[in-house]
Image (tube, rainbow, N blue to C red):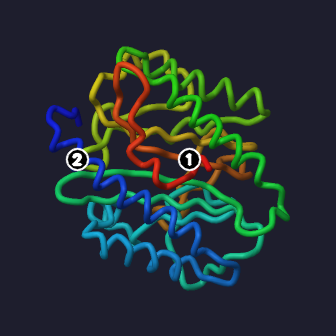
Amino acid sequence: MSITQASELVGMKKASEAVALTLKEMRNFAKPGMTTKELDNYGGQILNDLGAKSAPYLTYGFPGWTCISVNNEFCHGIPSDKKILGEGDLINIDVSAELDGFWSDNGGSFVLGTDVNQHQEIVAASKQILHKAICHIKGGVRISDIGFLIETEAKKRGYKVIKNLTGHGIGRSLHEEPSEIANFRDKFNLTRFKKNSVVAIETFISKTSSYAETLPDGWTMVGNKGGFMAQHEHTIVVTDGKPIVLTEMNEIWN
């Protein structure tokens, strides 16, 4: 969407604070021995208390309030009573929701407890790359140039990017134009970021895979060559200068 009046910015801020707070609290609540369903129910209750509705459930009938992916699961992991979190797990939580007609999206990967499996480095890389990418976004900048920046920064650190997972426009629905904000230079995408537009910017930083594939459950995605991936996401408003990071309250950069 494009912000055309003050009330729309207020609405987007409110929806964004709801998903950001939920993500932050879920990350703090997660403990070894907990099931992903227990963690999801906790997040779902926070959204409900704030008057927000789960976007993946509303839009796609997703079997959970949030997406929780663990270790080799890249994204869209289904919360389950059978999946138990362990010390050192690489966890990704993606929280998106609708509140009073406005939609916002954010996510983040983190290591649970002690980093016994050496995942912290890729988590840090994803955070740093997202920060650098967002700092370079303003009206008139080519979307493909930001993709090139993300892939270049990933390669510098010895990583790859997932080419079939992208950021996207958002605001009045979960996915809007621009429909694909890729993590690489897509030479066919001549679109530029527009001032006052609302977009969800995501990094998909991988150790071994370049594409994500869907498992037989119809939702969970893993790497085409296995391995691990870290993702971080903010919803922002594009300006003539520094973007407004609507979901900054999630503290994924801390």
- For the point 65% across and 80% down, which residue is it? 84
Amino acid type at circle 2 is Val
Q: Secondary structure at mark 2?
A: helix
Judge left or right: residue 170 versus residue 25. Answer: left
User: Camera-side residue: 156 or 213?
Assistant: 156
User: Camera-side residue: 104 or 253?
Assistant: 253
What is the spatial separation of the Cα atoms under label 1 and label 2, in whole angstroms?
24 Å
Image quadrant containing the N terminus: top left
Point out residue 222 in the picture as x, y percentages from the top left corner: 61, 55
Q: Which residue is mark 1?
A: 232
Q: Secondary structure at mark 1?
A: strand
Point out residue 64 in the picture as x, y percentages from the top left corner: 41, 72
Judge left or right: residue 132 versus residue 113. Answer: left
Point out residue 51 in the picture as x, y percentages from the top left corner: 25, 70
User: Camera-side residue: 254 or 58?
Assistant: 254
- For the point 53% across and 65% down, which residue is it? 77
